[in-house]
Image: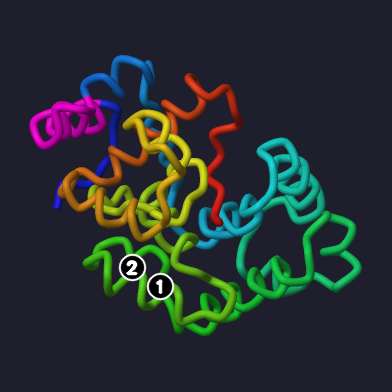
Amino acid sequence: MRIIRTIDDVEAGLAGLVMLDARLEHVIDKAGPVPLRRTDPGYRGLANIIVSQMVSKASAAAIWKRMEGSLGEISAAAVLSLEDDDCRQFGLSRAKADTLRRVAAATVAGEIDLDGICDIEAAAAIHELTAIKGVGRWTAEVYLLFCAGHPDVFPAGDVALQNAIGHALGFELRPSASEVDSLATTWSPWRSVAARLFWAYYAREMRRDALPVTS
């Protein structure tokens, strides 16, 4: 498994994708530079993904800034010290606050190793992550993609990716998650690079915030 660590790895993936699906050469031309977007694995990385879910990039950044201002280092232990009022003042929904706490508790108890999980096969890693209530498949896939650097994960439930694929490949209607999941098998073993490509296409061609958004 070739971990996506550098922009050179992304470039290698793009070259591989064109060999797998010639249509993507047009998408690459339109998308412009495809960013690496790597984040260190661990509790902080997963917490940032949870905070960013279902909100705009600006809103997520504001919540994260308030959390950092209060906690300093955003760690599992620090999040477990928060009161409900603290979470509300940050702008966290009750559901997100509860998920952050459950992940923190599992991390502190040693029930999950968020660094070690990066080294196992994607399906097994997703199974472990989604065993924590509140952590859905999209959250687990985005963690593996951006924090673990896994090369072959595609978050088919992401609305931005669905829209980008539909627009770029000429779909009459936005493809469903199951349609995208099936289509993405063509791009294995570089599905994580394909996801980065379509997010870049979405940002440049559709002029929208390219923050991953789940359905």
Type of amino acid at the residue the image marks with label 2: Ile
**The stretch drawn in magenta includes residue 16:** yes
Residue appearing at x 56%, y 54% in the figure:
49
Q: Main secondary structure of the magenta part?
A: helix
User: In which quarter of the view is residue 111 placed?
Assistant: bottom left
Say whether residue 183 is left or right of residue 33: left
Picture residue at 31% right of the left edge, 48% below the top: 149
Q: CA distance from mark 2 to mark 1?
A: 6 Å
Range drawn in magenta: 8-24
Are circles 2 and 1 on residues that touch, CB within 8 Å? yes
Image-quadrant location for residue 105: bottom right
The percent position of residue 140, horizontal first and vertical second, equals 43, 63
Query: Which residue sits furthest left?
Result: 19
Residue at point 8%, 31% (across, down):
19
Q: Name the residue nearer the viewer: 92 or 203.
A: 203
Q: Secondary structure at mark 2?
A: helix
Q: Identify residue type, mark 1.
A: Asp
Q: Which residue is mark 1?
A: 113
Tell me if residue 158 comes above or below residue 83 in the rendering.
above
Q: Is residue 81 above or below residue 91?
A: below
Up-down relation of residue 22 to residue 38 (above or below): above
Please say which color scheme the image uses. rainbow
Residue 156's tag is: none
Name the residue nearer the viewer: 74 or 123. 123
Image x and y of residue 46, in percent:
52, 59
Q: Position of residue 73 (x, y in %)?
A: 66, 53
Q: Residue 71 at x, y = what percent?
A: 75, 56
Task: Give the residue number, with chain letter if any, for mark 2.
Answer: 117
